[in-house]
Image: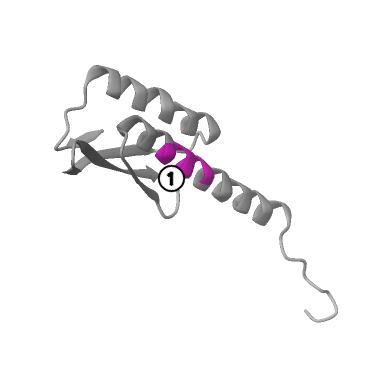
Amino acid sequence: MQGVHVELTAALQNTIRDKFAVLLRHNPWIVRIHVRLQRDQHHGNKYHYSATGQVEVGGPDLVATVKGDDAYAVIDGLVQKLDEQVRDRHERRKDKRNHAPSIDPENA
């Protein structure tokens, strides 16, 4: 976890850990999850947040970015995006494993 221009309070750190634990339950082969929360310039009296998550698994890493006005909503959106990517990759690998291309003996 990394905070850029924002202090990661204990409550925010606990929220990030709890939310990202879902990804570990869906895929036990995850090596590492890196979360970066950044507070950008403020618009009027509101701040703008962006969160980037990187999930290290076998093969190319999964990366997602979400932007918004609320830090907790941005973290929720990031977890949803990465969870969808993890499930999609799992399904693609499962399909590839279960539906291997058949070899036609007449043409081989």
What range is drawn magenta here? 77-84
Q: Residue 35: horizontal and vertical position, in percent?
A: 30, 38
Q: Quadrant of the C terminus?
A: bottom right
Instruction: Give me the residue at 24% from left, 18% from top.
Output: 10
Q: Residue 22: horizontal and vertical position, in percent?
A: 49, 29
Outermost residue toward the left in this view: 5
Task: Give the amino acid at mark 1.
Answer: Val
Instruction: Give me the residue at 21% from left, 21% from top.
Output: 9
SS state under label 1: loop
Residue behind mark 1: 57
Q: State yes or no: residue 36 in magenta.
A: no
Q: Residue 58: horizontal and vertical position, in percent?
A: 45, 48
Q: Is residue 61 left or right of residue 7?
A: right
Give the quarter of the image for residue 5: top left
Taking depth in this image into account, of 49 and 61 the one nearest to the observer is: 49
Give the quarter of the image for residue 103: bottom right
Q: Is residue 74 above or below residue 17?
A: below
